Image (spheres, rainbow, N blue to C red):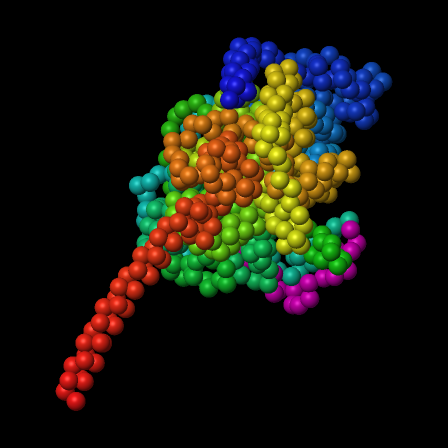
Amino acid sequence: MNYRRTIRLVFILILAQWLTIGIAHAGSELPRFLDAISAQDIYPDADKIGTPDGDPVVAPAFKEGKQIGYVFLTSDYVNTTGYSGKPIHQLVSMDTSGIIQKALLVEHHEPIVLVGIPEERITAILKDYEGMDVGKLVRGGLNHDIDIVTGATVTVMVMDDTILRSAIKVARNYGLSGLKPEQKITGPIATINPDISDIEDWESLVREGSVRRLKLDLKQINEAYDQMDDFRASDIPEKGDDNEVFVELYAAVVSIPSIGRSLLGESEYQNLKKKLQPGEQAIMLAGGGRFSFKGSGYVRGGIFDRFQVIQGDTSIRFHDRYHKRLRHIAAEGAPELKDVDLFRTPANMNFNAAEPWKLDLLVGRNVGPTEKIFLTFTLDYAPPQKYLQFTETDRQSAGDNDAANKKEPFWKKMWLLKIPEIFILILGSIVLTLIFFFQDWLVKRPKLTEAVRTGFLIFTLVVIGWYFNAQLSVVNILAMFSALVTGFDWGYFLMEPLIFILWGSVAAALLFWGRGPYCGWLCPFGALQELINKVAKLFKIKQITVPWAIHERVWTFKYLIFLLLFGVSLYSLGDAEHLAEIEPFKTAIILKFAREWPFVLFALAVLIPGIFIERFYCRYLCPLGAALAIPGKMRMFSWLKRYKECGTPCQRCGNECMVQAIHPEGNINVNECLYCLHCQVVYKDDQACPVMIQKRLKRERHTVRSKAVADAGNSKKQSAIAVELTKKI
């Protein structure tokens, strides 16, 4: 039809225009953001923010003519590119003592925020940085952790990482909080000598420092809490003999061949070598006493929260997937300890087994029903010189390990954190693929088909949508095209693994089946609409059939909405992202209707018609569905079967199609089809499809005729037998 050609032409022209747009100018954005706010907005105690200067740029903060601190933009110091492919700009202020005063999110284009967590939640997270001593953080005297598993998104992780690393850089550049600037140093660099692999006993390992120990008795613990300013800490002492061991902790780097073979035994050491990935090292921790260095929190959350390893400015908390429990220490003369455990250091942490490090053990004491006070005890470790080899070379001081951190893609953290969700989503995609590949077998069983579809829709809504928050949006498409213009990088899109996997599934499905697999099966909001309509039908609510003449004109609205959003994005991607609120996905799926009432009312306004008109929003308003339908004609296969009688004269499938994707003449419009398989159920049903009914009737007539002939033959035979018997009588 002509309107389809027009839409495609407009789409191509807009895309061509966008691809000719110049890339944004380079340079610091700090002056622009400072001009838009007052001094107090970013530095509460300042009365003036000076002229930005330096390389990278900072702006001095003044109070009564005296400089009291610095203001900087995180994107000037580190790569702050988020999921959108554009920088996440944050202003940070820090005083001359290296204490952060404030952090502001001043600009972003993150789709995960626009269709994900509310901005108020990010604002609350940014308040946690106020009063943070950067030097204390670097030296390991300050615990900083962000809830990256249950509460935060990839965007929040990027923000946290960039605030800390940029603040460390500024503190080093200006010598704040005792931090020194990075400098080139010349001298021998230590590495592990792989040729030394002698096996030694426990006493020798302890004596030479291959195994280091931290031992505390009850008296030492109680005295440490008594010295705290909080009087509550000394009110609940550890009860028992003063000499009783509270904790005895041993640590060793077992990826050093000699130490590993001695402590693990030959078989376990060889297993470790096979397990270690490039860049990984291994540490053995063993302990006894009243207090366990492992605790039980890792069972619930997967993270060992009672200790961390610190090397330079890098701190490592271990996840259970990097952990292995051992039965005992293999070295001759080793004590029997209740906890013997092996931990691998993630490759992206750049842990150097040849350099000194320390382990901080966090000991907590309950001072209330839900409140604890913590003390930190340190075990220092340095590998013995005899296991090292030295080469003369130039090297960069440890600093804040930014250079190393930049080499390791940030998105890998997210994939590791979401392994269970990734597995479940991939498994769901495989199940859906099998449904399509074996659809001919499935549709012959109407009740099973209905049960499978309803079950999958519930999985999509509850698991993919409400639990995983993996709802695609037209914002993702706008962000992708923007990235193509400004510099495409797979890392941007890999940072949200579930969204990436879904888009990969969409891309593959478009080649095989069109937009139907996502819109009809994997879209949480689409699943919500269909399940609501199923409930309505159970209550016998009358359904409305939109006249075809109206239907085929109104379905173009979603294409016009998409083109409008696409056109606005040429002028301002931010404006287009806000207009994309026409998608109620954030309200209904991500935030589960816990939002301001105008958004909730709009979501309900597009859901309520779906009670009477199945998939109302999908049919007429969804810009994401329109965007997926445009390349839908590229599909290579047509697996939805039709008879020549379909449409002329039979209209059974067309009348029962839930989104009226079957034209009166009988052909299926793949741009509108949601691949629900109902037409294929009818196609195979010899009680519903006229063609199949005729075939069934022919079979039945043939069966009746055959039976009649057989019965006639049997009658003649019986008559002959009767005559024969009569003669004999």
Q: Is residue 477 magenta?
A: no
Give coordinates of residue 534: x percent, y percent. Answer: 61, 50
Q: Residue furthest right?
A: 64
Which quadrant does the C terminus fall into?
bottom left
Please tell me which residue lies in front, 478 or 407: 478
Give coordinates of residue 491: x percent, y percent. Answer: 50, 29
Q: Is 275 displayed left or right of 577 in the figure?
A: left
The reply to whether residue 558 is visible in this rendering is no
Give coordinates of residue 543: x percent, y percent. Answer: 64, 45
Q: Residue furthest bottom?
A: 729
Q: Is residue 236 magenta?
A: yes
Q: Residue at x 56, y 53 (%)?
A: 298
Please tell me which residue lies in front, 93 or 68: 93
Q: Give the total of numbered labels.
A: 0
Give the quarter of the image for residue 714.
bottom left
Which region shows up in magenta? 230-255
Q: Is 721 displayed left or right of 499 in the figure?
A: left
Please tell me which residue lies in front, 246 or 539: 539
Q: Residue furthest left?
A: 728
Q: Is 684 displayed left or right of 121 in the figure?
A: left
Give coordinates of residue 684: x percent, y percent. Answer: 41, 49
Is 708 above or below relative to 40?
below
Q: Residue at x 77, y 60 (%)?
A: 235
Is 725 above or below relative to 483?
below
Is 127 above or below relative to 42?
below
Q: Residue at x 62, y 64 (%)?
A: 243
Q: Residue at x 67, y 30 (%)?
A: 582
The reply to whether residue 445 is visible in this rendering is yes
Please tell me which residue lies in front, 442 or 405: 442
